[in-house]
């Protein structure tokens, strides 16, 4: 059987989307490794492996250990300049945020993090560069990326929300 026939037979649209997101994720992590030589703060950016399909028993065990749904794909919990940290959710072009992912990004945004939904390597690079500058551009929102709603200005009162 030729390779293309095997690929077509075993490749569902959902699997291709996940593969596209995984390829983006790998490229972004490789960039972080490269940039960390000049910007050591980036060595602390991490991925919490809480996604993916798992057997029921393992999923229950991880939940008991504190795994939470919706945690951003890449998280840098260290402040830099005006930012309390950096949180990035990576999505394929057709990917959508889950309600839990949107809640995490909103909560981190309100905590002073630069948050972003990145659908390309170029978007990710721009977000990292913005974080490394350490300051918020005037008139800009605290997050970037398609798929995440506009931020409420920092001066506006915010109602408290439960932690995710």
Image (cartoon, rainbow, N blue to C red):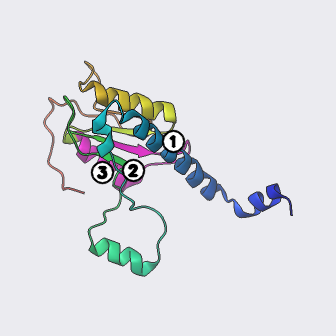
Question: Does residue 47 lie above or below 144 as drawn?
Answer: below
Can you tell which mark lies on residue 164?
none
Can you tell which mark lies on residue 27?
1
State the CA–CA distance, disc 3 to disc 2: 14 Å
Query: Which of the 4 quarters of the picture holds residue 80?
Result: top left
The number of discs equals 3
In primary-sequence order, the first of circles 2 and 1 is 1
Q: Could you tell me which residue is drawn at 49 percent across and 68 percent down? A: 53
* Picture coordinates of residue 146, whole percent (x, y): 45, 36
Left or right of residue 140: residue 126: right
* Picture coordinates of residue 161, whole percent (x, y): 18, 51
Q: Which residue is mark 2?
A: 73
Element marked by disc 2? loop
Q: Could you tell me which residue is drawn at 56 percent across and 45 percent down? A: 94
In primary-sequence order, the first of circles 1 and 3 is 1
* Picture coordinates of residue 95, whole percent (x, y): 52, 48
Going by the picture, which residue comes out furthest to the right?
1
Element marked by disc 3? helix
State the CA–CA distance, disc 1 to disc 3: 26 Å
Question: Badges 3 and 2: C-beta atoms under 8 Å apart?
Answer: no
Q: Residues within 10 Å of mark 3 (few under 14, many from 20)?
A: some
Question: Does residue 51 lie above or below 44 as drawn?
Answer: below
Q: Nearer the viewer, residue 61 or 132?
A: 132
Q: Nearer the viewer, residue 49 or 90?
A: 49
Q: Residues within 10 Å of mark 1 (few under 14, many from 20)?
A: some
State the CA–CA distance, disc 2 to disc 1: 13 Å
């Amino acid at each position: 059987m030729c390779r293309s026939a095997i690929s077509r037979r075993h490749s569902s649209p959902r699997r291709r989307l996940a593969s596209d997101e995984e390829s983006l994720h790998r490229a972004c992590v490789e960039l972080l490794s490269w940039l960390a030589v000049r910007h050591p703060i980036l060595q602390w950016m991490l991925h919490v492996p809480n996604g993916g399909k798992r057997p029921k028993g393992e999923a229950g065990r991880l939940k008991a250990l504190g795994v939470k749904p919706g945690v951003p794909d890449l998280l840098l919990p260290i402040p830099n300049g005006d930012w309390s940290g950096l949180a990035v959710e990576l999505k394929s072009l057709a990917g959508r945020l889950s309600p839990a992912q949107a809640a995490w990004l909103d909560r981190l945004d309100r905590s002073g993090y630069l948050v972003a939904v990145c659908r390309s390597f170029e978007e990710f690079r721009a977000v990292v560069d913005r974080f490394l500058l350490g300051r918020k551009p005037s008139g800009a929102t605290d997050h970037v990326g398609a798929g995440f709603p506009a931020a409420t200005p920092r001066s506006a009162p915010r109602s408290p929300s439960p932690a995710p």
